[in-house]
Image (spheres, helix red, strand yellow):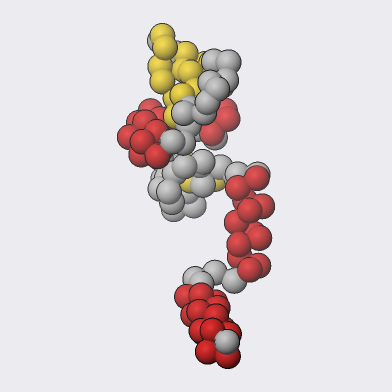
Amino acid sequence: MRSEIRAVLVLAGLAAGCADRSADAADGAKRNREAPRMEQEADGTDGVRNLPSSFGRSFATLDEYLEHLRNYAGPIDQPWYRQVRPGVYEVVTSMRPAPAPKTYTRDELMREFGFKR
């Protein structure tokens, strides 16, 4: 019994030591996820960063970001946008039951994600 308790404590200590973020950082990440901020790059490029499912990348154009979502977010069951006709996009998800289709114009997506013309 005593060795089982010791093993649990050792595993708990290892798990705590392996954590790469503190609890405060995790709370901050939750707040950022709830209210994502789209920011322009400060180094003079017009790339937009901190976009949903961007995995730390920044994007110069909406087309570049939408292509990234299709190639990297879609395969891991995250939403992406499919062009259904020129200038109109539909959100694609793997949610079941499938929600009613949501469509956005190109201008709406550009405003939503912070891209300039």
Residue 54, given in percent of the width and then of the height, sits at: 44, 44
Q: Quarter of the image holding residue 2?
A: bottom right
Residue 100 sits above or below residue 21 on the image: above
Residue 76, given in percent of the width and then of the height, sits at: 40, 39
Q: Is residue 51 left or right of residue 86?
A: right
Rendered residue at 58%/30% (across/down): 112
Rendered residue at 49%/52% (across/down): 42
Q: Quarter of the image holding residue 34?
A: top right
Residue 106, given in percent of the width and then of the height, sits at: 49, 19
Towards the viewer: 52 or 5: 5
Residue 109, given in percent of the width and then of the height, sits at: 52, 25
Q: Is residue 53 visible?
A: yes
Q: Quarter of the image holding residue 35?
A: top right
Towards the viewer: 32 or 113: 32
Q: Is residue 16 left or right of residue 30?
A: left
Q: Quadrant of the N terminus?
A: bottom right
